[in-house]
């Protein structure tokens, strides 16, 4: 997950919405993007999950 967060961050994506595993912790081993995503999930879990579950704008529906 750290690699994916880093790649997305390098391409300019600021708001990363990947649901963390149950045992994920905010010690990111140097990945600011992963740390920001996990802290965002911990601070506002309900809001994070609402955005995570909402339909994407670029979906084929």
Image (cartoon, rainbow, N blue to C red):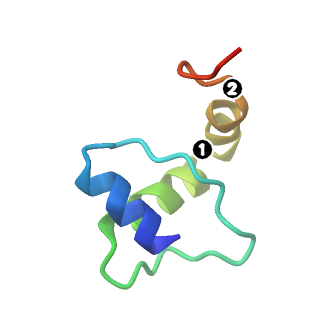
Asked if residue 14 is positioned above or below residue 35 in the image, the reply reads above
Instruction: Give coordinates of residue 4: x percent, y percent.
Output: 45, 64
Closer to viewer: mark 2 or mark 1 = 2
Residue nearest the viewer, comparing 8 with 54: 8
Q: Which residue in the structure is indicated by mark 2?
A: 54
**Residue at 37%, 85% in the rendered image:** 29
Q: Which residue in the structure is indicated by mark 1?
A: 44
**Residue at 33%, 73% in the rendered image:** 31
Asked if residue 6 is positioned above or below residue 58 in the image, the reply reads below
**Residue at 69%, 31% in the rendered image:** 50
Answer with mark 2 or mark 1, whichever residue precedes in sequence: 1
Q: CA distance from mark 2 to mark 1?
A: 16 Å
Q: Is residue 44 left or right of residue 35?
A: right
**Which element type, helix, strand or loop, lies under badge 2?**
loop
Instruction: Give coordinates of residue 36: x percent, y percent.
Output: 40, 58
Total marks in image:
2
Asked if residue 48 is positioned above or below residue 30 in the image, the reply reads above
């Amino acid at each position: 997950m750290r690699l994916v967060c880093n790649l997305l961050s390098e391409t300019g994506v600021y708001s990363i919405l990947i649901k963390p595993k149950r045992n994920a912790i905010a010690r990111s081993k140097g990945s600011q993007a992963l740390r920001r995503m996990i802290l965002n999930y911990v601070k506002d879990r309900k809001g994070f999950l609402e955005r995570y579950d909402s339909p994407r704008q670029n979906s084929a529906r």
